[in-house]
Image (spheres, helix red, strand yellow):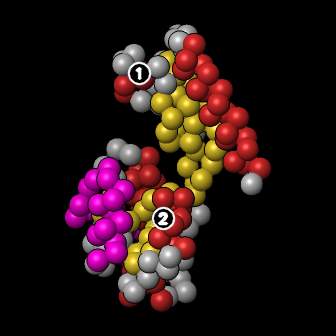
Amino acid sequence: MPMVRRGEVAFALSSIPRTAAHPELQHEPLHVDTAVIVARVGHPLAKRRVVSAKDLAAYPWVLARRWELERKALDELFAQSGLKPIQAQVETTSAVLMKSLLLHSDFLTFVPHEMVFWEEGANLLRPLKGVGSMWQRHVGITTRCDAVLPPQAQQLVQMLRETAQQFSRH
């Protein structure tokens, strides 16, 4: 979003806030997805039917950077349980690194459910039940309020809208 605000890119396809974070930006929601707390299948918490925030706080975490929307939502989940925000042992934007740490250790993470679709299907990673299982994020297009998109960007945005409509029907 900072790159959109500065005019470095025409638009962003990303998580969007529910209300405009900056008056010069506008957000068009396209899709809503859920985020989950994830562990490897053999993780001690993966066998539990319900996991509490206190249980989760005892394990190491690999998370997105602190200013990411998902990270802020996780902080809020712990605050609602009366706990301090999680201090990540590893902060990264790399999905590969996150998944690798989960697969080979007792690390936990908080990511969009779609991000672990294949690993869940292969019985490698598992969303945990309990705290954090109902969080949703809005995905959409962010543009500057005063900007007119170039024709190619307009075409791409239209294709994204059509794809999002098809995706939401399934």
**Would you place residue 27 above or below residue 133 in this image?**
above
Check if residue 102 falls in the magenta segment: yes
Q: Is residue 61 left or right of residue 39?
A: left
Q: Residue at x 36, y 56 (%)?
A: 95
In space, the residues marked 2 and 1 are separated at their CA atoms by: 29 Å
Residue 116 bears which disc, if any? 2
Residue 93 lies, in percent from the top left, at 32, 50
Q: Secondary structure at mark 1?
A: loop
Check if residue 81 falls in the magenta segment: no
- Region rendered in magenta: 82-104
Residue 48 lies, in percent from the top left, at 49, 88
Q: How many marks?
A: 2
- Kind of residue at disc 2: Val
Q: Is residue 160 left or right of residue 51?
A: right
Residue 103 versus residue 71: which sits nearer the camera? 103
Instruction: Give the crowd class for mark 2: few <14, some 14-19, many >=20 residues within 10 Å.
Output: some
Occupied quadrant, residue 141: top right
Occupied quadrant, residue 99: bottom left
Q: Residue at x 51, y 73 (%)?
A: 120
Residue 9 bears which disc, if any? 1
**Residue 86 is at least partly visible in this image:** no
Q: Is the residue under label 1 in contact with that under label 2 (CB below 8 Å)?
A: no
Residue 71 bears which disc, if any? none
